[in-house]
Image (cartoon, rainbow, N blue to C red):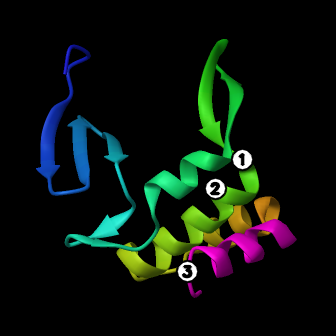
Amino acid sequence: MELGYNIAVKDSYCITFVKSDSIIDLYVHPSLGGMIFIDGGKLLEYKCLREFNGVEIISLESYVEALVSAAHAIYKERIYTLNDYFTVKEWATEETFKLAKKTKVYL
């Protein structure tokens, strides 16, 4: 909020901030309409440190991001774009499919 973002949407597991054409979604659990499609607590078991613009941040392992990206596109957006395809193609590994099965995410 201190950076000029306003709350656009707030639900049980997500809040969306907007500033001009910049949108930030913060999730406790990836969800749609109050229905959780991936357990956010389980996702945090796969965090790592990365550098972004010279700042060290906590992120998810790339193969986990592949699963989250695919699930978000299918469950929430209901469209799998070319961008989604190339993101998943680049980041997905066998571990992605094992995690999908473990978390009961069916793509």
Location of residue 5 with respect to 34 vertically, above or below: above
Q: Amino acid at mark 1?
A: Glu
Q: CA distance from mark 3 to mark 2?
A: 13 Å
Taking depth in this image into account, of 1 and 32 the one nearest to the observer is 32
Quadrant of the rendered structure where residue 64 is? bottom right
Location of residue 49 with respect to 74 vertically, above or below: above
Quadrant of the rendered structure where residue 21 is? top left
Taking 31 as reference, is 89 left or right? right
Residues in magenta, as a range: 93-107
Location of residue 85 with respect to 29 vertically, above or below: below
Taking 68 as reference, is 51 left or right? right
Q: Residue furthest right?
A: 94
Q: Amino acid at mark 3?
A: Val
Neighbours of disc 3 within 10 Å: few (<14), some (14-19), many (20+) = some
Give the residue pinned by disc 2. 65
Give the residue pinned by disc 1. 61
Q: Residue furthest bottom?
A: 106
Q: Secondary structure at mark 3?
A: loop
Quadrant of the rendered structure where residue 104 is? bottom right
Neighbours of disc 1 within 10 Å: few (<14), some (14-19), many (20+) = some
Q: Position of residue 17 (x, y in %)?
A: 23, 39
Give the residue pinned by disc 3. 105
Query: Which badge, 3 or 1, comes first in the chain's sequence?
Result: 1
Taking 78 as reference, is 57 left or right? right
Q: Secondary structure at mark 2?
A: helix
Where, quadrant-wise, is the C terminus in this rendering? bottom right
Q: Residue at x 35, y 50 (%)?
A: 27
Taking depth in this image into account, of 12 and 65 the one nearest to the observer is 12
Q: Position of residue 80 (x, y in %)?
A: 54, 79
